[in-house]
Amino acid sequence: MSVEQQEAKHTGAPVIKRMSSIAVGSEVRIVRSNRVVLDNIVCSAEIVITNGTITRILPRGGHSSANDAEVLDVGNLVVMPGVIDPHVHVNEPGRVAWEGYWTATRAAAAGGITTMVDMPLNSLPPTTTVSNFQTKLQAADGQCFVDMAFWGGVVPENQAELRPMLKAGIPGFKCFLISSGVDEFPCVSLMDLHKVMVILQGTESILLFHAELDNTQGIPASAHTSEYSMFLESRPDIMEVDAIRTIIDLCLLYKVKCHIVHLSSAQALPIIREARRAGAPITVETTHHYLTLDSDNIPPGATHYKCCPPIRKRINQEELWAALHDGHIDMVVSDHSPCTPDLKLQGDGDFLKAWGGISSLQFGLPLFWTAAACRGFGLHDVVRLMCANPAKLCRLEERKGALRPGWDADMVIWDPDKEFEVQEHMIHHKHKLTPYLGFHLRGQVFASILRGTLIYQDGNFCPLPCGDHILIQSKSSDKGNSPYY
Ligand SMILES: [Zn+2]
């Protein structure tokens, strides 16, 4: 039991009541805690904020000029950089029945995420042209409770849009080597990729790959499609391994930064390690579901567990954990990809026909911590895998992902010891269907601060969204009107 919990037990008061009298939506001048996660230490400190930026970090008690109304003293709760989730499908505009900026960014704020990056597909239109990107920005306008950046998409025949999209503020692009599941975002051929690599050479951009190749014979017509084992067999490890081999060849040839999204198969790790040793600028993410769920515990017909690549066996999961520990996987993301419940075909339970995608955005931090803490991971590992490395991926590492003077005052305040059960009424995603309902998790988020504003505290949100659209500009290019560079 933590000190906070012991105190709460004695006083009978919820921990959060001791935090502050600062109203949600207000500016915070100073954050005080006995457990502030700085670059190399966890220590007692106070963080001084001016105009949304961290200006100083002092020993606790080192500052006395602010009045109490502007000081957030959180006792023994952990203060950490806000989580950055670089893999979220918001689906707006076009598929707002699935998810949207208002609901997704509130769920993010409640989960300690202060920046997220939207995927280019499942919205209509997809983010594959400058014009479509402007449409997306308009759709997000005034709806975001956290900061939002936006990936672009590479599809056949949109090569002429890529450099203009970079100039418009996109940090990089995602592509598929296999059907994406939606017609408006087709996969690319190897020939397309060679053209794209030439275009991206010399830029700071990064190319994100859904790494599966359709290299199998398919499944027999007689298969029991409500059995998860059948679905797993239909997408074997070799689909990922072969795709990643192709990506590595391109990466080594062109030296364009590449990133493997949602790695599921640990069988690809040896070739990734080898490619890095050979100088390939390649990074890798995995997701909460591959680290938390395993194929032997997915009930028949439970299509809310369906995603691609698939959730694999426990032994594979432990290899992913080992790679995270050793730094061979760089970050952990949600890949929050919801849809309307009817598309999950829960009545039929058909894993082949149901929409693939898992909802988890709000619970990323406790999901990770619950499984990580018992494997010996510490708070600095959380910062490395969920804040610092995602910041680098989307070129925000000079202002987000760490608590340092000069950086944005983005913070999550949480209790790594507090346990809770995931219940439907807590969920702020548009739809409540998730494999994690009923899970007992460790690590509760109490508050989130975005550029100095208390955007979430103990179930309450700031009255108006104050997230920015983050437009990433290359340091060498025209700075334009970007608010960031
Ligand atoms: Zn995704």
Image (spheres, rainbow, N blue to C red):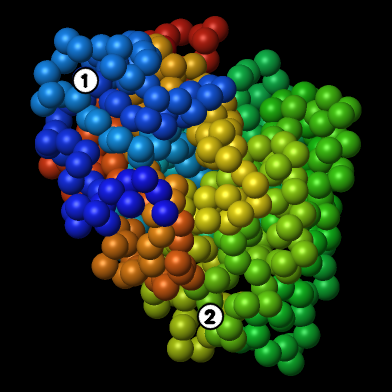
In which quadrant of the rendered image does the N terminus lie?
bottom left
| Residue with the most extreme front position | 10
Check residue 302 in the rendering and tell me which mark sits there, or answer none: 2
Q: Which of the marked residues, 1 or 2, is nearer the chain's N terminus?
A: 1
Q: Is residue 308 visible?
A: yes
- In terms of depth relative to the viewer, which is nearer, 420 or 322? 420
Do callouts 1 and 2 mark residues in contact (Cβ within 8 Å)?
no
The image quadrant that residue 310 belongs to is bottom right
Disc 1 marks a residue whose amino acid type is Arg
- Separation of residues labelled 1 and 2 (CA atoms): 47 Å
Q: Secondary structure at mark 2?
A: loop
**Which residue: 63% across, 59% down?**
290
| Residue with the most extreme bottom position | 222
Q: Count neighbours of disc 1 (C-alpha within 10 A) and say few if under 14, some if 14 to 19, many if 20 or more.
A: many
264 is higher (above) or lower (below) than 303: above
Q: Secondary structure at mark 1?
A: loop
In which quadrant of the rendered image does the C terminus lie?
top left
**Which residue: 88% across, 28% down?**
278
Give x and y (percent) for residue 475.
52, 10
443 is higher (above) or lower (below) than 224: above
Disc 2 marks a residue whose amino acid type is Ala
417 is higher (above) or lower (below) than 425: above
| Side of 172 where 66 appears, left or right | left
Q: Count neighbours of disc 2 (C-alpha within 10 A) and say few if under 14, some if 14 to 19, many if 20 or more.
A: many
Q: Which residue is mark 1?
A: 29
The image quadrant that residue 220 belongs to is bottom right
**Which residue: 33% across, 52% down?**
5
**Depth-wise, is mark 1 or mark 2 nearer the camera?**
1
Give x and y (percent) for residue 118.
44, 42
